Image (spheres, grey):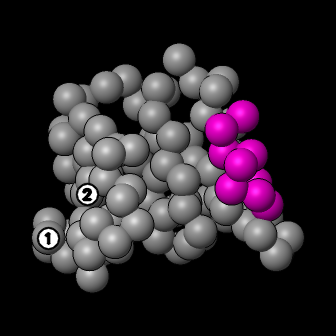
Amino acid sequence: MQRPRLVNFDLGHFFDAIAISGELGISKPDPRFFDEAMRQLGDPDRTDVLVVGDSLTSDIAGAVASGIDSCWYNPTGKSTPDVSPPTYVVRELADIVAVAGGLT
């Protein structure tokens, strides 16, 4: 399901690596999913990586459990949870650029 979206919207060239749970047989928030994504990226220092997602239970909780900063895309302004809080919260997709710009 994800590969056709990447092709249809011509998004693939924006990413250095693409980890898709259906292809890996490992679903988020399992830390092995994030370990595999890191491997695909050449095992960078995790402090140089930002996981961006809209799911607190998959994307953000998995990033937190894997020791990776996270950015929760929260367009509706829901309350930030106390458990597994994201490193950053943005309401606009364009704001992710500013957040990611702080990473080295």
The alpha-carbon separation of the residues under discs 2 and 1 comes to 8 Å
Which residue is pictured at 67% across the width and 62% down the height?
A: 73
Residue sitting at the far bottom: 1
Q: Which residue is mark 2?
A: 19
State which quarter of the image contains the N terminus. Answer: bottom left
Residue 24 visible, this angle: yes
Of 16 and 28, which appears nearest the observer?
A: 16
Q: Which residues are magenta?
A: 89-98
Is residue 33 shown above or below 58?
Answer: above
Is residue 22 shown above or below 87?
Answer: below
Q: Is residue 12 magenta?
A: no
Res. 28 image quadrant:
bottom left
Residue type highlighted by circle 2: Ala
Instruction: Measuring from the top left, give residue 78's x and y in whole percent.
Output: 82, 74
Q: Which residue is mark 1?
A: 23
User: Are dots 2 and 1 in contact, CB under 8 Å?
Assistant: yes
